[in-house]
Amino acid sequence: MHKTEKVNLATAFASFSEHWSPRIAGQLNGQKVLLAKIKGAFVWHHHEHEDEMFLVHKGHFVMEFRDRSVALGPGDFLIVPRGVEHRPVAEDECEIVLFEPMATLNTGNVVDDARTVASPKQL
C-alpha cells in the first residue's frame, strides 16, 4: 500500500482505542510506519536483525533497558538498536509512531499471546 494522501496523526489515533495493537499508517522503502497506543508494561524483548524508532506523539513513556531507563515525551524519539533488550512502559496512555522493517514482529524474539501482533491492521 502506498498512499499519496496526508495522514493526520490526531485523526488516525482517534480511529482506534486498543492498547498494544499497532496500526499500519504507511509504508516506505521496505519500512512500515506504525501508530500505537500504549499503556502499562510491554514484554521484555529484542529484535535480532532490526533497529526500531519510537516517536512520541502524545503522552509519556519510559523505555526500559536492563541497565537504564529513558523517559520520553511529546516530540521525543529514540532508536533502539538491533539486539538490545528493551521494554516500553507507560503509566498513562501514550500515542507513539514506530518506524521498522516490514517483517518486524512487535514482540521480537518473544511470542506472547496477549501482546504479539503478527499482522497489524491497516488504518
Image (spheres, rainbow, N blue to C red):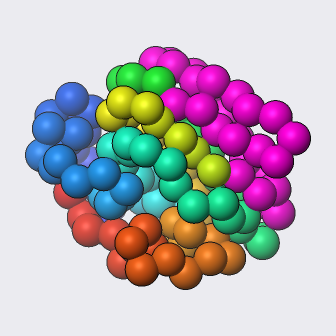
Q: Note whether residue 52 is visible.
A: yes
Q: Quadrant of residue 121?
A: bottom left
In the image, what residue occupies the spot 37% across and 56% down? 20
The residue at the far top in this view is: 74
Apparent side of residue 105 relative to residue 118 in the rendered image (left or right) = right
User: If the image is split into quadrants, where does the C terminus sit?
Assistant: bottom left
Q: Note whether residue 50 is visible.
A: no
Image coordinates of residue 97 in percent, x first then y, are 44, 41
Q: Is residue 106 above or below residue 112?
A: above
In the image, what residue occupies the spot 43% across and 68% down? 115
Image coordinates of residue 113 in percent, x first then y, are 42, 80
Q: Is residue 40 above or below residue 29?
A: above
In the image, what residue occupies the spot 44% across and 52% down? 33
In the image, what residue occupies the spot 82% across and 63% down? 83
Q: Is residue 116 above or below residue 89?
A: below
Any magenta on residue 51? Answer: no
Q: Nearer the viewer, residue 28 or 15?
A: 15
Q: Nearer the viewer, residue 108 or 111?
A: 111
Image coordinates of residue 72 in percent, x first then y, are 58, 24
Image coordinates of residue 75 in percent, x first then y, are 50, 19
User: If the image is split into quadrants, where does the N terminus sit?
Assistant: bottom left
Q: Nearer the viewer, residue 51 or 2?
A: 51
Apparent side of residue 55 relative to residue 70 in the rendered image (left or right) = left
The residue at the far right in this view is: 67
Any magenta on residue 64? Answer: yes
Apparent side of residue 13 relative to residue 37 in the rendered image (left or right) = left
Region in magenta: 61-86
How many numbered discs? 0
